[in-house]
Image (spheres, rainbow, N blue to C red):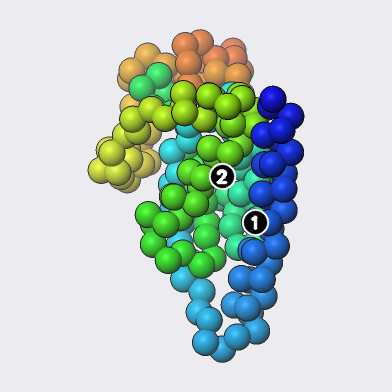
């Protein structure tokens, strides 16, 4: 069953690549079409490294979009991608388009009920702004007793190299 959803996801992605190609081409050659670039934080519902990599790759291969950064999750919050969009009508439209992409991807990776199972309540936008506004997210995660673990995700422990590097930073 997942093979069918994977097949439909690949076909859908091909369609998105073609649509994105036409949009970027029209933006370059048409004097009336103006780009409205934006960087949007997209909180992921994907949880595994493979799903996150597949989502980031899908965004990046689509013309007009690019993943410019990631934020690993904590026990309370999932990971996020920071996506640069060349033609952003609104933040809500960008998030809606990314959510559709992620839902199709999760259906392909988890099966028919996988995307619906991932529909968890997400943090509010104000919490996101507060967390990343001052660049102290790492200190806040450390204060909560979590360290960056293998694969860049927050969790107890972490590698000894990361722990020694974090101790050196704390001593400064």
The picture quadrant where one finds residue 120 is top left
Note whether residue 53 is visible. no
Determine whether label 2 and label 1 are within 8 Å by CB.
Answer: yes
- The foreground one among 73 and 96 is 96
Q: Which secondary structure, mark 1?
A: helix
- The foreground one among 23 and 171 is 23
Position of the C terminus, as image quadrant, is top left
- The foreground one among 125 and 101 is 101
Q: Position of residue 142 (x, y in %)?
A: 38, 21
Q: Which secondary structure, mark 2?
A: helix
In the picture provided, is 61 more to the left or to the right than 98?
Answer: right
Q: Residues within 10 Å of mark 1 (few under 14, many from 20)?
A: some
Position of the N terminus, as image quadrant, is top right
Give the residue pinned by disc 1: 16
Q: Residues within 10 Å of mark 2 (few under 14, many from 20)?
A: some
Note whether residue 93 is visible. yes
In terms of sequence position, does the residue under pointer 2 or pointer 1 come before the other? 1
Q: Position of residue 86 (x, y in %)?
A: 54, 65
Q: How many marks?
A: 2
Identified at 30% across, 43% down, the residue is 125
Give the residue pinned by disc 2: 101
In the picture provided, is 159 more to the left or to the right than 80?
Answer: right
Q: CA distance from mark 2 to mark 1?
A: 10 Å
Q: Position of residue 65 (x, y in %)?
A: 59, 57
Q: Which mark is residue 150?
A: none
């Amino acid at each position: 069953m997942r093979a069918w959803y994977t097949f439909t996801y690949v076909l859908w992605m091909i369609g998105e690549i073609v649509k994105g190609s036409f949009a970027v081409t029209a933006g370059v050659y048409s004097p009336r079409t103006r780009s409205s670039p934006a960087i949007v934080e997209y909180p992921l519902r994907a949880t595994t490294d493979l799903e996150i990599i597949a989502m980031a790759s899908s965004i990046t291969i689509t013309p007009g979009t690019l993943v410019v950064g990631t934020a690993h999750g904590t026990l309370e919050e999932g990971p996020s991608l920071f996506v640069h969009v060349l033609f952003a009508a609104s933040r809500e439209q960008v998030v809606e388009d990314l959510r559709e992409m992620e839902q199709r991807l999760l259906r392909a990776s988890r099966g028919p009920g996988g995307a619906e199972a991932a529909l968890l309540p997400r943090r509010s936008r104000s919490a996101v702004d507060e967390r990343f506004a001052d660049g102290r997210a790492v200190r806040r995660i450390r204060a909560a007793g979590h360290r960056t673990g293998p694969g860049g995700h927050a969790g107890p422990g972490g590698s000894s190299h990361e722990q020694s590097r974090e101790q050196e930073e704390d001593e400064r």
